[in-house]
Image (cartoon, rainbow, N blue to C red):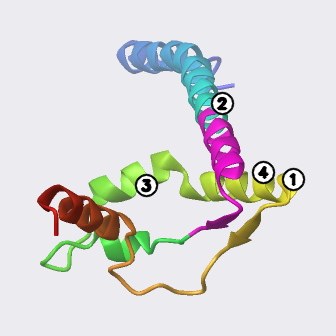
Amino acid sequence: MWEQDRFPGDETAFAAVELYRERYYHLYPWEANLRDQIQKRRREQYRVFAHDLVERYDEITLIKPDLAKQARNTKGKQDTNRLVWARIASLYELAMTVTNTAAREGVTVIVPESVEPPYWPMDTVEEEMESELVGV
């Protein structure tokens, strides 16, 4: 092992590598544990959300967003912040949880092949709410 193949004058480098090794062996399990806790919490939230959807609706439409297209700003560069949050949200896991829960309960899930923007249903909801407030 490299610990036995020491040479004169390597004390500084060896001490730095040894410190890194000790920190690594301490922090890696801690990080893995936090990651597992976050994934379990997210799965549980998705499970409860999917159950609520299945209880409320007889038919569920899942739209697969084009995250890369949505993350592009006006200059054509990617907004990596949006991509990071999309990865954290784990939309695939949410879709699979909803799909599996719906299948178990006999609820229909529709996944359209492609949807052209603007496809966000909240736009129509906001318009309806505004028209109700205005009295139109």
Q: Which residues are magenta?
A: 45-62
Task: Indicate the amino acid at tag 4.
Answer: Thr
Of circles 3 and 1, the one toward us is: 1
For the residues bearing labels 3 and 2, Cβ distance under 8 angstroms:
no
Q: Nearer the viewer, residue 56 or 132?
A: 132
Kindly indicate whether the residue at mark 4 contacts the one at mark 2 (C-beta within 8 angstroms). Answer: no
Q: Which residue is mark 2?
A: 40
Residue at x-position 29% and y-position 68%: 123
Viewer-proximal residue, 85 or 104?
104
Find disc 3 in the rendering and name its residue. 86
Q: Residue at x 32, y 71 (%)?
A: 70
Of residues 6 and 134, which is closer to you in this image? 134
Q: Is residue 116 above or below residue 73?
A: below
Q: Secondary structure at mark 4?
A: helix
Q: 10 Å neighbourhood of mark 4: few (<14), some, or many (≥20)?
A: some
Q: Is residue 93 magenta?
A: no
Kindly state the secondary structure of the residue where label 2 is placed. Answer: helix
Name the residue beneath numbered marker 4.
Answer: 101
Task: Name the residue type under label 2.
Answer: Lys
Q: Is residue 96 left or right of residue 80?
A: right
Q: Are marks 1 and 4 in contact (CB under 8 Å)?
A: yes
Residue annotated with mark 1: 104
Q: Which mark is residue 20?
A: none
Mark 1 vs mark 4, CA separation in Å: 5 Å
In the image, is residue 78 above or below residue 84?
A: below
Q: Label 3 vs label 4: CA separation?
A: 22 Å
Residue 77: x and y, percent? Answer: 21, 73
